[in-house]
Amino acid sequence: MSNNIDLNPKFGGLLKDIRFWIVFFFLLRLYGITFPPLEVGHNWRQTDGLMIARNFYERDSNIFYPTVDLAGEKSGIVGCEFPTLNYLVYLVSLLFGYDHWYGRLIVLLSSSIGVLFFYKLIRKYFDESTAFNSSIILIVSLWFSYSRKTIPDVFAASLCIVGLYCAFGYFEKGKPLHLLIFFILALLGCLSKILAATLLTVLLFPMLDRNIPLGRKIALSLFSLCILSLVCWWYFVWVPYLNTTYGFGGHFFMGLSFTEGASRILQNLNPVLKRFYGTPLKYFGFAVFLYAVFLVIHKKLWLPLGVFLLPFISFIIILIKTGTSIIGDHYYILTAIPSMAFITGYGLTKVNSTKIATIVLTLIGIECIAAQIYDFRIRQPYRSLAELEVLLDEVSQPSDLIAVNADFHNPTAMYFTHRRGWATPNSNLSDSTYRNELRDKGCQYILIVKKLYGDLNLEHPVVHDSEYFKIYRINDYKKESFK
């Protein structure tokens, strides 16, 4: 698998060294690394994972029993994605005390390493120009902002990319250590995010290579089967068991049937397609991506086309199970970006003018980064949520159960209160019968987040009222603290 054409723009010196750009973008994304996880885009997804990490630190460190604070009077044990990232936050917290931004840094470090091995893998089997272009496109894509969020998608994909590199190294040299590292990283990557498993499908190519010893193919196949078995056990045996046993199902989305998922996608085809052409590489980058796909088909360059199509089509197949979730949760597209970045970078090497290729690569970077700069600011009213724990400490005890007027299972406000209880919409809290049920279960206070979720006037004593928050006391007696 070799392409001898090297049309990589001659930047000279450090500018043509991918390590320079990896370090440059790493340092760039350190800006605001300690900001609270309150970016407009999917702060709920970050706080949900951080809630689990904090509970590992403060309550129970058993990785098989992740716990959230949204289950009211229940234990909060919940079935979810395997909490690899959450547990790493917990392990760092053992050394330095808990803080949310450890998750940001872990994802940023892992994604930077992932890009390096993405580059090394492509350079090994294609050429340096393709590897450089593809890696730059990956860095500036949607990965740019999500590589500093405590969300497992980029983290999981990075683990699988490094695992892939080790798998190809095992095929080449037969060292057991390579096979072991592949097994560990690929297993943790797939457990952390099932969609990341689609990146491993390119292993089909060495499996079909007659020059690779059969014993190595069998060994890697057995380890891959073990990965598949463990992933299936976690998601389809253990997660349902936790949800059934501890009574907090529905918090983690387990997907739809293929028939229902496909039906929903067809009914909402335009917004689903927009997530592909408007999100990962933005519009100009997607146009270059289409050009690259057309080019390799037109020139019958089947190898790069196959390397792109295997993970990309696998991604689409699994995505069908999620239905239209990708419309609202655009992080679903993250694990498809490496394959898109590869074929786009490969297409740029076929541009006859290195100057034009450089300009195109630069324009892709400018558009992608400009579209994500907003994510490096924490704006009101979200910023006010960071004050909630101090505010609640003035009127209640950390052991008090509370209710927050957020959407069902939205953990953001509850995370910042550093308390347990219920996230429930205004329509429920407006019902006195429902409030009585909460009170009977031990709920002491109702927190109203005015600017985000709307104000409510209730017939209960107000213990705090300010621009952003209102707190009602609904229970005058104290129950024994939940353990």
Image (cartoon, rainbow, N blue to C red):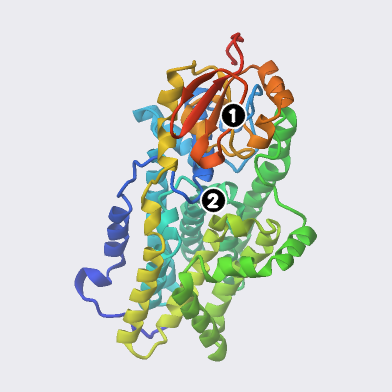
Q: Nearer the viewer, mark 1 or mark 2?
A: 1
* Whether residue 334 is situated above or below residue 352 in the rendered picture: above
Indicate the quadrant where residue 12 lies: bottom left
Q: Nearer the viewer, residue 178 or 398?
A: 398
User: Which residue, given by chain and number where applicable, does mark 2 sit on?
Assistant: 189
**Image spot of residue 262 (x, y percent):** 74, 64
Give the amino acid type for the residue marked by disc 1 in the picture: Asn
* Whether residue 296 is situated above or below residue 402 in the rendered picture: below
Q: Nearer the viewer, residue 325 or 185?
A: 325
Residue 169 visible, this angle? yes
Q: Residue at x 73, y 68 (%)?
A: 266
Give the amino acid type for the residue marked by disc 2 in the picture: Gly
Q: Residue at x 43, y 33 (%)?
A: 467
User: Which residue, given by chain and number where applicable, does mark 1 sit on?
Assistant: 457
Q: Residue at x 60, y 65 (%)?
A: 201
* Whether residue 246 is situated above or below residue 303 in the rendered picture: above
Report whether 275 appears left or right of 233: left
**Image spot of residue 133 (x, y percent):** 38, 74
Q: Secondary structure at mark 2?
A: helix
Q: Earlier in the sequence, mark 1 or mark 2?
A: 2
